[in-house]
Amino acid sequence: MAAMQEKRDRISASILAIIASALEPLETKEIQQLLGTATRIKILYRLNRLRGDGLIKGKQIGSGKGTWIWWDNSYFENEEKRGEKKTRK
């Protein structure tokens, strides 16, 4: 049980680090490619838990089982402080 908890913490910590260092919101697929050590289901589970805990934000941009994008809570705040307006695709 302790090993399972430690592994979950490692995956969640890695996801947080990836999202915090990203220059733009990332799709689940991009996070999976950067992480490379866990299945998509495990990553989605961790992302939704982190979103539920208020550590990151996410939005589904497709219908049904569509694509999700994820970003750090301060992403848009920092963009406004820098005075940057990026065109979103």
Image (spheres, helix red, strand yellow):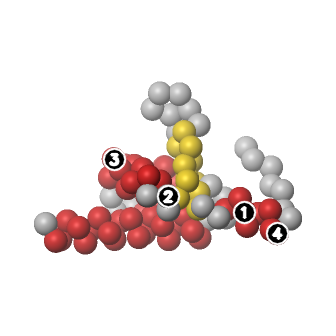
Residue 35 versus residue 4: which sits nearer the camera?
Answer: 4
Work out whether mark 2 precedes mark 1 in sequence or the reverse, and give the earlier one: 2
**Residue 55, image x, y percentages:** 50, 62
Work out whether mark 1 precedes mark 3 in sequence or the reverse, and give the earlier one: 3
Disc nearest the viewer among 2 and 4: 2
Q: CA distance from mark 1 to mark 4?
A: 9 Å
Residue 9 versus residue 14: which sits nearer the camera?
Answer: 9
**Residue 57, image x, y percentages:** 55, 53
Q: Residue at x 71, y 59 (%)?
A: 76
Q: How crowded is the residue under tag 1: few (<14 C-alpha within 10 Å), some, or many (20+)?
A: few
Disc nearest the viewer among 3 and 2: 2
Amino acid type shown at disc 1: Glu
Work out whether mark 3 precedes mark 2 in sequence or the reverse, and give the earlier one: 3
Examine the rendering and report whether any part of residue 32 can be seen.
no
Q: CA distance from mark 3 to mark 4?
A: 35 Å
Residue 5 versus residue 23: which sits nearer the camera?
Answer: 5
- Location of mark 3 (residue): 41
Amino acid type shown at disc 3: Ile
Q: Residue at x 39, y 61 (%)?
A: 36
- Location of mark 2 (residue): 54
Residue farthest toward the right in the current orientation of the protein: 83
Image quadrant holding the N terminus, namely: bottom left
Q: CA distance from mark 2 to mark 1?
A: 15 Å
Residue farthest toward the left in the current orientation of the protein: 1
Query: Looking at the rendered structure, which numbered label has been put on residue 82?
Result: 4
Disc nearest the viewer among 1 and 4: 1
